[in-house]
Image: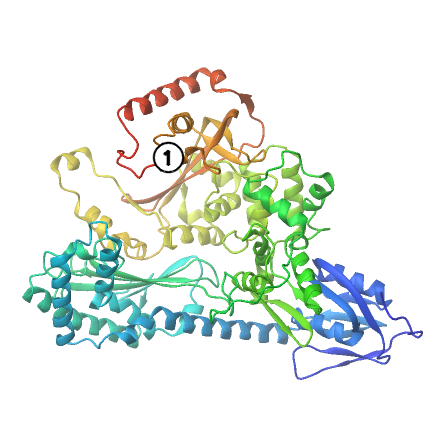
Amino acid sequence: MVNTRLSAVFVGVLAFEAYAFSVPVIRQTDLKVTLTVPAQSVKSALDRLSAELHVPLAASPETAADVVCFRLKDVPFQEALKRIAEAVDASWQPAGSGYRLVRSSEQLRAEKTRETSADVERFRGEIQRATAGLQNLAPWSSGTAERLAVAAESFLKSNDPQGGDIRASAAAYDLTQKTPLGRVVKELAQAMDPRDLVDLPAFYRTVWSSNPTSMQRPFSRDTWQVVENFLKDQAEWNAAVERHGLSDAASLSRGYSTGRVFDWQNMSPHTVSTVLLSASKVTPSGSVMLEFAAYDKAGRRLGQSQLSLSEFYGEYAQNGKKTDGSASPPEQLISFGPDAKYLVASSSGHRAEADAWPKELRDRVAAPEECDPLALFVSPALIHAAEMKGVNMVASLPDTSISVAAMGNAADVRFDQLLGRLAYFQTSAELKDGWLMVRPMRPSESRIHRADRAVLGKWLRGLASGTPVTLDEEASVALSLPDPRINLLPHFMSGLFHQRPGGEPNPDLLRLYGMLTPEQRQRMTGSGLELGRLTNAELVFVNRLLYGPGTILQFKAPSSEELKSGELPPKMALFNNGLLREATEALPSGIPTEGVLRLKLSSSQVAKGNMQGAREGHGQMLTPRSLAWQRFSQERTDLFPTATQPGRQVDLTNLQIGWQSNLTFTFAFTPMLSMVFGMDGSVGRDFETVTLDSLPDNFKKQFDDAYQGFVRMYANARPGELGIPQGLVLPP
């Protein structure tokens, strides 16, 4: 509803203010608007507002795809436009008889500067939180070493840290944190410039070294001073350990991230030759894992220590309580709406209803260009919250906000809980002066990684049609949509129609596969594709696989003669627990152009089984052995009582049989070093329904053999007597 006392054409001039957001000056100041718009593109939202006001409002290409929602009640026109521009970091310019929402290059630069400054402060706070315990420790000295050794000796006389006592294990860990190796990674974090952490490349392990290769960085003066102090402190600690006979107490810290801190004979200032500090960053604005490691002259690892600088967003915690611990008073709960509840239940596989999706809802979900996904999961709660508080609301929503509903299975929440979830998923919300304003914490980043609704819509409609999905199609779509490690919206929406039973492939490998040409793939399956023939864009993904946080670099297996001798090759020993385990050391000059990428294609017969109670398409791909394990563990609930719990039990009365393709990628960097990845081809929905008694002959023989093997394996087992925790359902 709009106050329509305006009879003449609007004539406005742009009022540029010192602030980034500018607002048109309207001659008629009594025009007011009442309008509620669910989440949709800025272009669509302005079309709605323009139709209500009879004022031409348009979005520039820079702002058109931003997703907004708002609730306006009796709001002056000028104020409404100001708030919309404020939410999306934009400004208004005159355009004919109306206005155009634009985002200038100056605004983009200012926006990026604000994001960087916020990230620097976030990492500064994370470092302070992670290293807060250091201030409670006495400065290191020979006296500190002596007192700690006395405490360790006393502890070991009365405790067995490996005996399973949680309190004893915690005390042992606390002791290790007070040693030089326990302190050093925290001291290194304190010496680092938070700006360096912000600038770290995502999806890589950045490595600093005392003897840097071309793939590593040298220590800064401040961080190297910490390393030198550590070596000096370690000498004092070694002397105290020797005086108190603690050299056999290496097991005190076994299994902890600080390494074997009492292994003083192997780690001393005289034997340490190389020290490394690595920082693993898995997303552009995510957390950072720091790891410090010391090596001797032969390259053997002597000790290591880790520290996580985890993400922290906003002033509200996940549980809906403010950070000061005070809870909000009882109040009306906010609803995400029936659609969100229905869809979240469907996506998790716990939907109680057996009926199919309503066609109207199915059509809306499959058309994100017309019905934005955030309108199904986020904006209903924001609109309800504004109504409950009696305020106006404008929200600019990043794709990450889709998870605020899924986080609690779309259950009703308090207002502070809603704000807490928004903050957790990188969205700020402020209630002030009668307005609820919601914005991305990193607007420029959220736009870069926003899912293209047209691409997503085409993909969802293909999935909804039930036609088989090929691996090539998956790879092509993966290249056109954001990385799921940054933006889960496409993955979540795809899961509403089809869950990949074979598990999700490595995102970098899938994208690399999508970029390879038919000629490149043909060479891979033949003599191999030389890595020097890859394009720069393709090499980006190979570098992530090799030098990323989850690298799986492998050393050539020893020959039968070497195995018989009982001695591993020296380089393999260094690979297992030494410098060669670090990819920037093993391949110090980067990816060798003479390396070869090979692809092996095969296929296997598998059974597709739905999880008990889940809708069609949510299940697992089962080999004959894993299917046999499902049957055996469900029959022996006396040994494995959790086998029939929701989310664990495969419905053995609802099986399908078919074939899936198996791709094995081998990156042979050198004759000794390689990486091997597997990726299963998506088989779609062309499986045939079977029962356990009607399995194909070859599959059934393997199934029966595996089942009888489990029967023999557990023939004498009794509840509680297994060598595993009772009830744990192990994979076959």
254 over 80 or under it: above or below: above
Instruction: Return the residue nearer the eye: 260 or 478.
Output: 260
Residue 325 in the image: x percent, y percent? 47, 69
In this rendering, position of residue 114 left or right of residue 639:
right
Residue 217 in the image: x percent, y percent? 33, 66
Residue drawn at the location 75% of the way across and 72% of the way down? 80
Residue picked out by circle 1: 731
Helix, strand or loop at label 1? It is loop
Which corner quadrant of the image does residue 139 belong to? bottom left
Instruction: Return the residue nearer the eye: 421 or 705.
Output: 421
- Check the image and tell me how it is coloured: rainbow
Whether residue 63 appears in this view of the structure is no
- Count all numbered tags in the image, as a single digit: 1
In this rendering, position of residue 262 left or right of residue 418:
left
Residue drawn at the location 69% of the way across and 41% of the way down? 362
In this rendering, position of residue 623 left or right of residue 401:
left
How packed is label 1: few (under 14 Cα within 10 Å), some, or many (20 or more)?
few
